[in-house]
Image: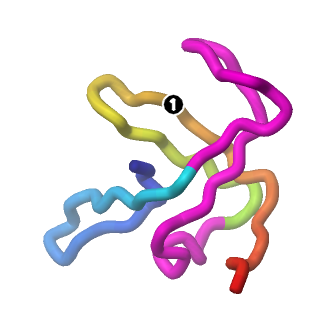
Amino acid sequence: MWDVGNRGAGGERELSIARLWVEYAQKLGPGETADVRLAPLSPERWRHLKCGDVITMHEARPVAGTATVIEILPPRT
């Protein structure tokens, strides 16, 4: 669940879902950093993002992590 900046009609935060995998590492532990790839389940909800944007990962409280967008690829068909 990611906060990519989308808001509902009442202004409430709407989280978006993406598949995540870590690149070049077997696992990612607490406090560690790595390159990851995200595959959004609803790509249209992510189209406004650009390189340099920071998004927030939510699994529970507190925030689970943050990511800085470094590359954007079109969805595979």
* Position in image of residue 13 (x %, y %): 27, 57
* Position in image of residue 3 (x %, y %): 42, 52
* Position in image of residue 54 (x %, y %): 60, 47
**Left or right placement of residue 28 versus residue 73 in this view:** left
36 in relation to 50, above or below: above
Name the residue rendered at 68%, 44% in the picture. Answer: 68
**Which residue in the rendered view is the most extreme toward the right?**
24
**Which residue in the rendered view is the most extreme toward the bottom?**
77
**Left or right placement of residue 70 versus residue 46 in this view:** right
**Left or right placement of residue 14 versus residue 9 in this view:** right
Magenta stretch holds residue 50: no
Badge 1: residue crowd in 10 Å (few <14, some 14–19, many ≥20)? some
Name the residue rendered at 71%, 37% in the picture. Answer: 22
Q: Magenta segment range?
A: 20-49
In depth, the one of 50 and 21 nearer the eye is 21
Q: Quadrant of residue 76?
A: bottom right
Q: Quadrant of residue 35?
A: top right
Say which residue label 1 marks: 65
* Position in image of residue 23 (x %, y %): 79, 38
Q: Main secondary structure of the magenta part?
A: loop
